[in-house]
């Protein structure tokens, strides 16, 4: 089953894992924006990592993983909800510097994870400087630093699919086999991108851990979905206030807001805009302009 995540555990050992593969979800992201190849890889790897990490955290609502850059890369963001939906987008200066790699693009960048409750309130989880030379390094550093859980992570992305494998050593109990964690962590590190992207999850685990007793749980489906709506855009415009909205109307004749995630455009003509503020508080003078 594609576009799903599967939990697994090592029988009798305080080690758990997740394996994820996303096809249609990832293509839905790529269809909406033309990302430079390097950003495509970063965003795809972040999407796989985000699905894996969100499955290890208990929350109701959405987990937002954001990388904020200081240079040509402005922002990478992936949102994963407890209902199993994902969306992602990026902001950058086009074109990216010639030959720039992960390290140049992310110099000085920070990675933050935030949980958003269903009522919209945010609980901040943690933030780390981006270190290492890839998304997996960045997030293993995050998990060590912010969650104090030993985590090993491998993520891969190509044009049609993203995939990832995560192992965590549960801190609360000791393993009767003291070498097991190091052994399975090393084995997990031998997974090749082609295997992670191309083999079925059960085959990936069999290939890596055939001497261990691994129990693989049923797949949980994941899918692309954007939570934007006309109602949400209206609330956002209402918060901007009538003066801001009227100045855009005066200049352009209408207000257009395009969702960064799904590219859907919401258009408001002067009548729609007037309705946003009807019955609300009106700033002085705005009703009598023109
Ligand atoms: Zn949207």
Image (tube, rainbow, N blue to C red):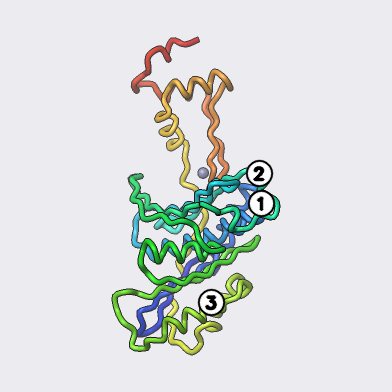
Q: Are marks 1 and 3 in contact (CB under 8 Å)?
A: no
Q: Quarter-wise, where is residue 45 in the image?
A: bottom right
Residue identified by numbered label 2 = 94
Task: Label 2, secondary structure: give it.
Answer: loop
Query: Of the residues under marks 3 and 2, which one precedes in the sequence?
Result: 2
Q: Are marks 2 and 1 in contact (CB under 8 Å)?
A: yes
Query: Of the residues under marks 2 and 1, which one precedes in the sequence?
Result: 1
Residue 247, position as x, y percentages in the image: 51, 20
**Residue extending farthest right:** 98
Left or right of residue 284, residue 67 in this image: right
Task: Label 3, secondary structure: give it.
Answer: helix
Question: Could you give the CA–CA distance between mark 2 and mark 1, rounded to whole angstroms?
Answer: 9 Å
Question: Could you give the CA–CA distance between mark 1 and mark 3, rounded to whole angstroms?
Answer: 28 Å
Q: Nearer the viewer, residue 165 or 266?
A: 165
Residue in view at x 44 percent, y 78 percent: 216
Task: Label 1, secondary structure: give it.
Answer: loop
Residue 5, position as x, y percentages in the image: 48, 67
Residue identified by numbered label 1 = 36
Quadrant the N terminus occupies: bottom right
Query: Of the residues under marks 1 and 3, which one precedes in the sequence?
Result: 1
């Amino acid at each position: 089953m594609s576009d799903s995540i599967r939990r697994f555990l090592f029988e009798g050992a305080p080690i758990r894992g997740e394996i994820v593969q996303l096809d249609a979800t990832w293509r839905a992201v790529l269809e909406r924006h033309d990302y430079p190849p390097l950003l495509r890889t970063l965003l795809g790897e972040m999407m796989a990592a985000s699905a894996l990490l969100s499955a290890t955290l208990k929350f109701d609502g959405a987990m937002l993983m954001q990388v904020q850059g200081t240079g040509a890369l402005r922002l990478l963001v992936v949102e994963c909800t407890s209902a199993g939906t994902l969306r992602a987008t990026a902001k950058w200066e086009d074109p990216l510097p010639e030959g720039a790699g992960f390290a140049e693009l992310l110099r000085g960048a920070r990675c933050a994870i935030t949980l958003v409750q269903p009522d919209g309130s945010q609980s901040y989880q943690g933030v780390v400087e981006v270190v290492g030379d890839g998304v997996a390094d960045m997030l293993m550093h995050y998990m060590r630093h912010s969650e104090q859980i030993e985590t090993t992570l491998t993520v891969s992305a190509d044009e049609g699919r993203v995939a990832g494998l995560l192992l965590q050593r549960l801190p609360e109990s000791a393993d009767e086999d003291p070498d097991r964690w190091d052994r399975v962590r090393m084995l997990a590190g031998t997974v090749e991108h082609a295997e992670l992207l191309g083999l079925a999850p059960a085959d990936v685990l069999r290939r890596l851990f055939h001497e261990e007793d691994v129990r693989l749980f049923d797949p949980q489906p994941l899918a692309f979905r954007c939570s934007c709506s006309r109602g949400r855009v209206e609330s956002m415009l209402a918060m901007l206030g009538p003066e801001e909205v009227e100045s855009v109307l005066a200049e352009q004749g209408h207000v257009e807001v395009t969702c960064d995630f799904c590219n859907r455009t919401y258009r408001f003509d002067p009548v729609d805009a007037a309705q946003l503020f009807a019955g609300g508080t009106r700033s002085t003078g705005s009703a009598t302009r023109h």
